[in-house]
Image: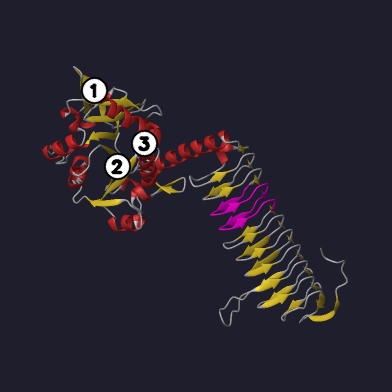
Amino acid sequence: MSAALAVVLAAGQGTRMKSRTPKVLHRVAGKAMVDHVLAAARAAGADRCIVIVGHEIERLREHFAGSDVELVEQRPQLGTGHAVQQVLPQLEAHRGEVLVLNGDAPLVDARSLGELLERHHAARAQVTFLTALVDDAERLGRITSDGGRVRVVEWADATAEERAIREVNTGIYCFDSAWLSRELPLLQASPAKGEYYLTDLIERAPQVERMLAEGGFALCIGVDTREKLAQAEREMQRRLRERWMAEGVTFLSPETVLLDVDCSLGQDTIVYPNTIMQRCTIGMGCIIGPGSRLEDTRIGNDCSIRESVVESAVVEDEVQIGPFCHLRPGSYIERGAKLGNYAEIKSSRIGRETQIHHFSYTGDAQVGQRVNIGAGTITCNYSSETGVKSATIIGDDASTGSDTLLVAPVTLGAGAMTGSGAVVTHDVPPDTLVVGVPAREVRKVRKAARS
């Protein structure tokens, strides 16, 4: 079976969303709806993807900039058949199957699309389309079969008897490209609306196959309101949690945890309630939450992240964070470090087995190994006069007393110490104790030899 061409319909205005954002760019589980559709098409075997755009075309061009997705404009928007007519030049050059999908159906999955392609190929059909059985069919097109002839009857044209039919059209199709190229130009506009409907092709095809979606209509639901967006989010979250539980992750209260599709969680990790994870990689044997938020972050194995916010950070193995920490972008925490009780880190590297326990701020700093940061220690990294941020360097095995202020740029040497309340404005040599305001050298530190 040759590779398929995917045509994604995304030209609609989406007025019912009441949004300045194009409908298909609204996110479900951290990814734009249209990107979910494209990912499913590619995973099912599409090697070329075309998105039909109309409203907010510049926003969509910006969204797809740098990708291999081709954009084709539909103007004016005169129905689904008219939309696909815009890609006739591309269809004529394609040999194989053509998938036609809706850009606002983020729950469609690659397995169903793959089965649709296989069914179409095996039957040598001109059209194969996906249907679903629903209890509340709303105003969707009903599937009828008269003498073996399959039709899609639009709600407006359906009789009361036809409206009672539970099998509905999902708007997901597979076409033979050569047949589609011949038939598309022959579509006639609807007298009522002046629009061209893709469903009209179903009646014209000599060989039509229909495949019932195993996942029901939820698999193919078109999101055109905020309520349906919330429904799609709930369903996607359920799928993601089930996926990771099958991989050995524990969710103590699954319905309270939010993930996105770009998260990866390791075996034996436990996720506590009210935790949010976005674009994160979590290692094995971790404890995450409760009440934590992790974003764009990589967490190693056997870490604990409790009641904390971690953004754009890297955390090595066996690190303890929280409760109530905030790791801001650019933080790198080495193995075995312990951070907690309102410690804030920004654009800093914290060395192995270093401890920063209480009410402190470390910004634009390089902190060595086995350092002890006392409660209330602050790196004063920003000059309001110059607008410049400067670096603080703290050597291995150094220690700061409570309420120490390190006025950058400054270096605290290896093994050096500060007394409580010290304001350090000059570099401190290794193994030296400084105290006072401004801090002055008192004596050399008498410590056991460092390994």
Q: In terms of sequence position, does the residue under pointer 3 or pointer 1 come before the other?
A: 1
* Of callouts 1 and 2, the N-terminal one: 2
Answer left or right for 396 relative to 16: right
Residue 376's quadrant in the figure? bottom right
**Residue 65 spot, x, y in % from top left:** 34, 58
- Foreground pick, 296 / 180: 180
**Image quadrant where one finds the N terminus:** top left
SS of the residue under disc 3: loop
Residue at image point 82% right, 76% down = 432
The circle drawn on residue 6 is 2
Determine contact: label 2, label 3, CB under 8 Å: no
Provide the secondary structure element on which disc 2 rests: strand
What's drawn in magenta, residue-wise?
291-319
- Identify the residue shown where x is 63% and y is 50%: 300
**Within the image, what quadrant is residue 61 found in?**
bottom left
Name the residue nearer the viewer: 226 or 421.
421
The amino acid marked with disc number 1 is: Thr
Q: Badge 2 local density, few (<14 within 10 Å), some, or many (20+)?
A: many
What residue sits right under mark 3 in the picture? 221
Seen from the viewer's position, the closer of residues 29 and 349 is 349
Q: Is residue 430 above or below residue 166?
A: below
Mark drawn on residue 258: none
Mark 2 to mark 3: distance in Å?
18 Å
Above or below 322: residue 9 = above
- Looking at the picture, does residue 262 appear above or below residue 451? above
Q: Which mark is residue 144?
A: 1
Measured in 3D between alpha carbons, the distance from the residue under mark 1 to the one under mark 2, in whole angstroms, is: 27 Å
Label 3 is placed on what type of residue? Answer: Ile
Give the CA distance from mark 3 to mark 1: 20 Å
Q: Quadrant of the C terminus?
A: bottom right
Inspect the image, locate mark 2, and give the three-letter code of the amino acid beneath it.
Ala
